[in-house]
Amino acid sequence: MLDLILRRLENTIIAVTFLFITLLAFANVIARYVFHASFSFTSELLINLAVLLTMVGAAAATRLGTHPSFSLLRDSSRGALHKIVVVLVCAGMLVFFLILMWLGFETAMKQLESGRLTPALQMPQWIFSMGLPLGALLGVIRTIQVAVIELRGGEAFKGEEAEALEVAEAVQAETEALEDAQRQRVTPTDTHTTPQEGGRS
């Protein structure tokens, strides 16, 4: 249940943020080359949205296993060596995300205390800066999740595409099994026997 909620949260943030970045950049290009003017607020919005997209995307990449993580050594190792590699990789990622979360939260709190505003939009800067610790927190959760699944002998690095293919293969196998069962089923045929008439004397 938690995995499903986090997955939907990550996918929603990534999709909405990328959509806003695309629309803002497109509007800025149109304004610059058609109206010979540019929106002053787009640059700061694009930068802050890019930070949020990068951090949440990093958490999603952790879930999908697309980070460089000595995959050759991890995939080729077995037994205790495999667990050691998984622990080392996840520990390094966990330390990285924890440092980012701490520094990002500390920066946001300093901005909140000082009342710092963005130059163009005049919005509290800490609201945009919270994207860094939020993405890092998602990364911490995903790293712990990956480590637990891998150490239990499961396969953590599995994307949604692979899961969809597995579901499709399972449905196809079930359909083929039903078709085979229908072909092998013998439908009873009614045979009507007429009594033989006795010999005429």
Image (cartoon, grey):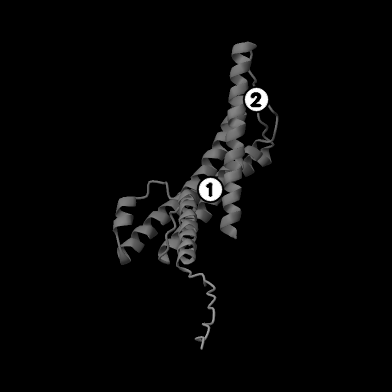
183 left or right of 118 in image: left
Mark drawn on residue 114: none
Task: State the residue at coordinates (66%, 30%).
Answer: 118
- From the image, tell me which residue sits under label 2: 41
Type of amino acid at the residue the image marks with label 2: Phe
Up/down of 37 relative to 20, above or below:
above
Q: CA–CA distance between discs 1 and 2?
A: 26 Å
Circle on res. 136: 1
Q: Is residue 78 above or below residue 14?
A: below
Q: Residue 19 at x, y = what percent?
A: 60, 33
Which residue extends farthest front? 201
Please state the horizontal and vertical placement of residue 24, each as a whole percent of the image: 62, 26
- Assign a secondary structure to mark 2: loop
Which residue reaches farthest bottom?
A: 201
* Residue 20 image position (x, y, % from top left): 62, 32
Is there CB contact under 8 Å for labels 1 and 2? no
Of residue 199 and residue 94, the one placed in the foreground of this image is 199
In the drawing, does residue 151 fall left or right of residue 128? left
Determine which quarter of the picture holds residue 111: top right
At a point 60% along the width and 37% down the height, the residue shown is 17
Residue name at image x 58 percent, y 55 percent: 4
Inspect this view and state whether residue 200 appears. yes
Q: In this view, does 17 lie above or below 80?
A: above
Pick whichever, 100 or 4, lies toward us: 4
Residue at horizontal 49%, vertical 56%? 167
Q: In which quarter of the image is the N terminus?
A: bottom right
Determine whether 130 is above or below 149 in the image: above
Residue 82 found in image quarter: bottom left
Q: Where is residue 113 in the image (x, y as percent from the top left)?
A: 68, 41
Graded by Cα atoms within 10 Å as few (under 14), some (14 to 19) or many (20 or more), the crowding at tag 1 reads many
